[in-house]
Image (cartoon, grey):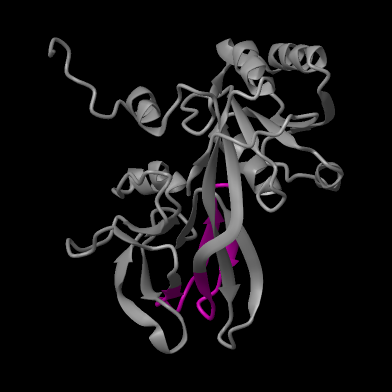
Amino acid sequence: MTNHPSAKPRFRRVGLVGKTGQTGMSSVMDRLLAVCEAHDVEVVFQGMLEPGDPPGPDIEGTLDNGVDLLITLGGDGTLLWGARLVAERDVPVLGINLGHMGFLTSVSQEGIEEALESLFRGEYVLDRRSTLEANVVGRDGSSRARYLALNDFVIHKRGMARVTRLELLVGEGDSQEEIGGFTGDGVVLSTPTGSTAYSLSAGGPIVAPGMDCITVTPICPHTLAVRPLVISSEETVTVLPLDRAGTLVLTVDGQEATDVSNEEAVVVQQAGAIVNLIRIPGQTFFSTLRKKLNWAIRPHGEG
C-alpha cells in the first residue's frame, strides 16, 4: 500500500469510539470535544462500549449516515475494532492512545490538541493499510461465515495449551498446491500491519506496511523444519484441520472468534477493503519501531 500525503479532505463530521473504564477517558473526551467545537467540527456520535461488547446498530447506522472521520480512544485493540467498522466505508481512522503499547495509535494523551490542530489544518498523511478476508467453508465449498481483519487471523485449538495438526495449501482450483502440514499450537495469517502483533511474538518477520504480502507464521511448531513464510498478496491460503476430534477456533484481530469444525476449512486472501490510518507528520513506521519496540537501539554508551 502507498501513502497519500495529498488530496486531503476537510473533516466536518467526526465519530468517536472507545471503551468505558479507560483511565483518563473523561478528560480526553472534554479536550477533544473542545478542539472539535473550536473548528466547527460536528461530533455525531460517541460509541462508548463496555469491554467485550459488540458494536450496536446505533453506531453502524450513524456511520452509514456520513461520518468522514473516525477517532478511536483506547489502545490498539480499540483502533482495530474501529477500523473494521469503517474498512468498507472509506472513512479514515485516527487513534488516540489511552493504553500501554499503542503501536498503531498515532496520538498520545499529551499531544491531543497539537495533533488535532494539525489534522484540521490538513497537515496529515493517510497510510493505506490492506486487510485480509477469511471464509469458513464446508466440504461442498459453500461459505457459512466471512470475516475481515486489519491485523491477523489465528487458527488454533480450543482449550488450554493443546496442540493441533494443520495442513496449509496455497492457490485455488487446479493451481492449488500443498505448502505442508505440521503439528503445533496453530497458525497466524497476518497483513503487513499485523506483522508486529501476534505474528512477531510467534517468531514471524517484521514487514513494512507498504508491502503487498501475507505472512504465514506457525505457532510453536513441533519441528525445526517449519518456519514463517511470506507470500504474495495475490495468493489464497487454505488451512485444513487434520485432527478428527475437537474443534478449532478462528480468531479475528484477537477480538472476534468462531468455531471451525474438522469438516470445514478456513480460506484466507487479501480483501478489497482498505483502512486509511491517519499519521501526523514526523511519525514514521521505523521511528515507531525504535520507540515502541526498541528496535536496533544502541546499547548505552555506544556512539
Q: Visible in this render: residue 257?
A: no
Given residues 254 and 163, the one toward you in this image is 254
Q: Name the residue rendered at 70%, 34% in the picture.
A: 9
Q: Is residue 242 magenta?
A: yes
Q: Position of residue 213 (x, y in %)?
A: 40, 58
| Rendered image quadrant of residue 56 | top right
Given residues 33 and 118, the one toward you in this image is 118
| Rendered image quadrant of residue 223 | bottom left
| In this rendering, position of residue 22 left or right of residue 75 | right
| Rendered image quadrant of residue 208 | top left
| In this rendering, position of residue 200 left or right of residue 56 | left
**160 w.r.t. 42: above or below:** below
| In this rendering, position of residue 140 left or right of residue 60 | left
**241 w.r.t. 98: above or below:** below
Highlighted magenta segment, given as a residue range: 239-267
Q: Name the residue rendered at 19%, 20% in the picture.
A: 298
